[in-house]
Amino acid sequence: MQIVSAELQPHGLNLETNDGEALYVNYIWLRDNCPSSWDEVTRDRSFDITAIPPDLKATAVGFDGTDIIVTWEGDGKQSRYDVDWLIKWLRNPGHADPASLLPRAWRAEKTGHVAEFSFDDILGDWATRCAYFETLIRDGLALINDVPEDNGSITRIVEVAAIVRGGFSGLYFNVRAYPKPQGAAYTANALEPHTDNPCEEYPPSIQYLHCLRNEARGGESTFADAVAVAADLKASDPEAFELLATYDVPFRFSHDGLDMRARQRVIMTDARGEVTGVTVSQHMADIFDMDQRVLDRYYPAFHRFLTMLRAPEYEAHLTLKSGQCVVFDNQRIVHGRRAFDPTSGTRILRGCYSDRGEMRSRYRVLLRDGEIRDVKVQGAD
């Protein structure tokens, strides 16, 4: 592709390609993205946009082989741009993102088909690591087998993707039945489908639960793809969906030495209205403080969504065994637990969180720096 003509305009250039396509590019955008605008060592942008006038203009434009050269008013600086790069950017603005993978919505059929990975392979084989990251991005749920039964193993899993992110309960937490529990998770009771820590301003995004021991009767773990459920709610009851995607609700965790509070939307959407995540926790929900007339409509919508989240057609379940670690997207996958009998044996899960953005960064770097080989993922379609 070539640019056959470039015409100076008050605020930018009119360009014409050899196939007759007309393109326009703003002057300040061009100057801001001159190849000299980035530091070669730090790779940070080093150009200060306030160093140029807000009405910057070009005085001349020319061509040199595959480059277009722009001369700027004032200091006479020349900026050189690769024509192919410029045309591609003007046609499709934005960097292509290999981590921007479409989610695979799933329902109860996930039971028995959760993608499984080996602890050693994730740590030692980068191709398996890529498959693991892709599974978390697409499905939001993965199971790691043969994890050594010690407190440090969960850290080794996390550090494949990110650093351990602390929450109000600390860097790590042990899920077991305590005589005086600080929260519903630390009992033997059933837990309704929920996402963790909505009382934090920025709830954690990736959650890890490493089963150190599970000898108790009951305690089966449950999971549901809340993004799939929300999409079904939108299709069947758009008014209910809109209510849950519009109003913030208060969440709170108040205990000895703690009083965590935040407001979240039950259904999160992007600019196109597509579901990007959910925030659901009845045991951390504070007193809803919307107008009482709004609650006339909100509560039925909330009730319907919660009922759908625990419906058999959406729920996948598994019994974690010692040496297994389940990893899931806490802003997409709701998780719960059947009640268990603490007198029948010990049940201890060690948990922590990390950041989803860091995991996606590691995935991009792996794709950039190596070749992907076929990897057999147990339980994957």
Image: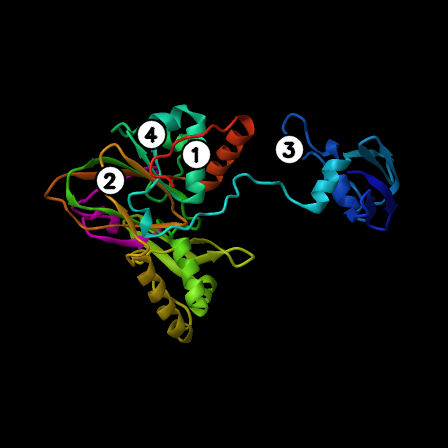
**Residue kind at label 3, given as amino acid type:** Asp
Q: What's the mark number on residue 44?
A: 3
Residue identified by numbered label 1: 131
| Lower sequence index among marks 3 and 2 | 3
In contact (CB < 8 Å): disc 4 and disc 2:
no
Look at discs 2 and 1 and give the one toward the viewer: 1
Is 254 part of what is drawn in magenta? no
Work out how far the residue at label 3 is from the one at label 1, CA to CA, in angstroms. Answer: 30 Å
Q: Furthest residue to the right?
A: 59
Measuring 43% from the left and 34% from the top, which residue is drawn there? Answer: 131
Q: Is residue 243 above or below residue 1?
A: below
**In which quadrant will I find the N terminus?**
top right
Position of residue 105 measured from the top left corner of the image (x, y, whole percent)? 41, 51
Range of magenta residues: 171-195
Label number found at residue 118: 4
Q: Nearer the viewer, residue 213 or 142?
A: 142
Secondary structure under the numbered disc 1 in the rendered image: helix
Viewer-proximal residue, 7 or 150? 7
* Residue 76 to residue 267: above or below: above
Residue that badge 2 annotates: 320
Query: Circle 4 — which element?
Result: strand
| Of pointers 4 and 3, the one earlier in the residue sequence | 3
Q: Amino acid at mark 1?
A: Ala
SS of the residue under disc 2? loop
